[in-house]
Image (cartoon, rainbow, N blue to C red):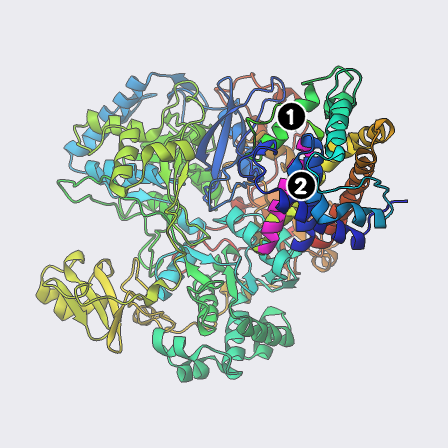
Amino acid sequence: MDVTAENRSYSYGFLSIVYLQEPTKVFIKSLKDSNIMNVLNESGLQFDEQITNDVSDKFLNDLVLEYTRLFIGPGKHISPYESVYRDNEDAFWSETTVEVKNFIESFGLEYSSYWHGLPDHIGVELEFMQRLTCHEKEAWAQEDKKTAIRCLEFEKKFIDKHLIQWISIFCDKVKKESRTAFYREMAELTRKFIDFDSELINSNLAITTY
Amino acid sequence: MFRLNRRNFIKVAASCGSILAGMGELSRVNALTGTLKLEEGGRDFSPDSGKERQAIPSACWQCVARDTILSYVEDGRLVKIEGNPASIRNRGKICAKGQAGINQVYDPDRVLYPMLRVGKRGEGKWKRISWDEALDLLVNGGDISGHSVKGLRNLLDEDHPEKFMFHYGRMIGSDSKIIKDNFLPAFGTNTIGNHTTICEGGKWVAQELIWGKHYDVNDVEHTNMILNFGCNFFETHTSHIQIAQRAINAMTERGVKLYTFDVRLSNTAAKSTEWIPIKPGSDLAVALAMCNVIMINELYDHDFIETWTTVTVEQLKEHLKRYTPEWAEQLSGVSASMIKSLAIEFANANPGTCISYRGPVAHYNGVEAERAFKMLDAICGYIDVKGGTCHGVEAKWKYPKVEPDKKPKQLNIIDGFPGDAAFPNHHVSHQVLKMIKDGRFGRPDIYMVYCYQPVYVNGECEENIQILKDEALVPFLVTVSPFYGETESLADLILPDVTYLERSSWDDMVCYDMIPEFYLRQPAVKPLGEARQFQDVAIELAKRLGLNLPFNSTEDFIKKSCEKSHVDYEYLKKHGVWHDPDEKPHYLSYTKTLTIEDYTGNNILFDSKTGVYWNWEKSKAGSIEEAVSKGYSDTENAYKGYIGQRIGDKVYAGFKPDKVNKSGKFEIYSELLKKKGFNPMPTWFPVPDIENKKDDELILSTFKVNVHTQSRTANNKWLSEINHDNSALINPITAGKRGIKNGDKIKIKSAVGEIIMKTRVTEGVVPDLIAISFHLGHWQYGRFASGRKSPFGADSDNDLKLKWWSEHGVNPNWLIRNRPDRIAGQWLMNDEIVTITKV
């Protein structure tokens, strides 16, 4: 169980970074080192970018521009906030935002002073899932089954009440609007991963609480 | 098409992991900081305004378990109660009774002002008086409806302070220390009654004879097998929430098995691995047979028996061999093969633990049964070990204590009639009214009842009422209570106490993690009306009487206790609980060795007969010569000077005695019992009433449900909405013989009374038995309890209009004689014989 939780935690961690900010040199380098795009292509995704060692690589520049165009603007862009999908298009700091913020903060976590976005950003929600799954992993490692199950229950609650509620609409938009394979395919991965993880949580809960 | 499955997910996740590792420090990338902690409760928000409610850490008092709580207050009103998640005892959980505590505060039938009787006693006519008038009457005496009563000062002037009797039902922690260790000794009375023998006095005495002080803690969370004799701990227990959640953890997480012997299918029995129906009063036989099986099969803990107990393996084998499983089957109805297999499984569980409570204990052979259960644990080596049966560990508060000028005096009416009980260590409370009626041993001039309903909770209700109604027998009856109960309705003066949610006290109930937890009860709201915490009233009474107490208020007492105990008062106020984080669970404390300094000194004697070192000055011996010549066992209160037990060439802390001069050993063989003419070894003897029962007679058994306490929750509307009516449970065979069908009304008759109630025919009780719950059938205690408005009742509660039930159940105590068992004085509430007829 702890290996599964660890793997899920890595996946959430990676995806959160994809959305939290525009790509950096370090990100691109580790992306290359990890060979992740090839791994994903083997499973049916279609990344067509080539990453080179050149630090002034066009790939990085293109991605930064694309991130900005897609998620920040100026002009028409895809809002990365849950409230916009749940409440209405102008719904910044709506009830959903407060709900997400309260939920996250009730675990003793705080929003970093480096974070300038709203509390219900896609990257934040994924990062929060990373934290929960990481906590679950540690609980399994210490054979603290009770805590691990509680983590699973909270993960289920957060996925069901929040991520599942808007992730597919958001990802479909990104897939449609993206001009680069990178964000298009990442959106597909995100969508599929959340579905996959939701099922995994349910079956793990069924096994552990049997 | 892209699909994630378990196989490619592992590869993807590995890449993700390496990306995260490759990125190094992420604190400027991540949006969240801080350490994730799982929310355990502890915060609450108003569903209307969304505002956070004020959480005041405190302690429950609905029952003796006294769990820690958080009282949530919104705009000055108590709106919700939860468990305090910071507590290592109840771990943030409480029961339904605890949550309904709010109903106590806002009970529309509460007594909010001092009330003086103006009509005849029991007539229900009252006059509101001021506190000043009330205390003046109590101190100086006066006239009540043409009847002249003495006051406390008169008793002092006559040098008969013992004629002030204080009788309490529940008074624990600092509440008790202020009254019992300060106010009453300063006044000079030791005529202090309690209610322990209608609970589990017999269980405590058995333990005092065998291993020392109660409470026993069954370490169910760490055990490998639980044997349960007649205890309904999933619904009610002196540590209900503590033991229930730990047992459930063990059962669900480690598959630990729980076997419950009970005459009734309680919810605990239902949730057990197996319910083993047993004939009433025969638990002792089963326990003895199990011990025999363990000895015969050489599954015992040889070293523990030979080193720590007062018997040898050979003696035990010889004593137990007559108790064969086949013999026990005849008496108990439990099959011999079941007895054998459970005994062997228990001995091999290593460790297991044996739970017991009032089911077996409130029988004529109850003390013996409790001794046998402890013997069963002991021969397997399960005493004070992790996962075994352990001595309770509680906070040891130090507190201010008065040094009275004169030794307090006592009327001999609290330990039963001479010969009633050989070891009335916890008094014989259910005989008090009979002794007052009898009169040979004196009568109190002032009888003060505190948090206690003697007419309702004891047996023979009718006689209790007649005694308390009689001004010649009880000249001045004062009750201290927030409610208009059955006893208040007969009182001369009612002093309105606060509820526990308006109260300040420190508390000390045992902790099932075996680590002492200090905790505090603090007011969630200000007392309603003119209700005053009685401890503060007593302090004022002391001032009026010119008695000096070493503190000047309840708060002062609590602060001084904190100072003396090295507990931070402000921390406790903020968090409600404190335990030393470096403390380790207290297992095996009897094996602690003492140093020579511990057991040498001018006042310390070695008693060669028992191997006990003791400080004779703490006993009642007049001189060292007297102490030496009488020896440890025969010197009164010698146990108070117990220091340690010599075994071989070492001196150990041992099993410290309490209330009797037991040695530091685990006394399976009890010299103390032998001296009083009882069997020194746990020995079978039958319950005479059950033995001599005629075919048409039934044995009455009583029980508790999960939403009520014995006498103090029927006024809680949320609880009474759930449970407000009861039926008499009888087995289909028993019912069939008498032509009784489910739902029929029957008359149940005993030697002292009769009641009429509905039946419920169920396989959930054994034949020849009738089982009735005992919380209902109030005839006072307000509208939610009895349908009767108290004379001071308000109509402020809208739920009064929504109350949809008019039944209030039946109290079986009208039928039960107030008889003590001959060892401990335990009320024989499970030995009553009744007949039933269809109405």
Q: State whether residue A157 is above or below residue A33.
A: above
Residue A127: say if magenta.
Answer: yes
**Badge 2 local density, few (<14 within 10 Å), some, or many (20+)?**
many
B133 vs A168: above or below: above
Residue B603 at what x, y percent from top left?
12, 62
Residue B448 magenta-highlighted:
no
Q: Residue drawn at (30%, 28%), measured in percent from left and top?
A: B536
Question: Quadrant of the image for the N terminus of chain B?
Answer: top right
Disc 2: which residue = A13
Please, what is the three-letter code of the amino acid marked with disc 1? Answer: Pro
- Let me know if residue B576 appears in the view: yes
Question: Which stretch appears magenta?
Answer: A123-141
Q: Does the image show residue B470? A: no
User: Where does residue B634 sit, x and y in percent of width and height?
Assistant: 21, 67
Query: Which amino acid is tagged 2?
Result: Gly
The quadrant the C terminus of chain B occupies is top right
- Apparent side of residue B199 relative to residue B636 in the rendered image (left or right): right
Q: Who is closer to the viewer here, B38 or B541?
A: B38
Residue at (43% x, 60% y) in the render: B390
Q: Mark 1 — on which chain does it sit?
A: A
Q: Nearer the viewer, residue A110 or B448?
A: A110
Q: Which is nearer the N-term, disc 1 or disc 2?
A: 2
Which quarter of the figure has residue B619?
Answer: bottom left
User: What secondary structure is the stretch in magenta mostly built from?
Assistant: helix
Q: Locate residue B173: give its quadrant.
A: top left
Q: Which residue is mark 1?
A: A119
B388 sits left or right of B253 in the view: left
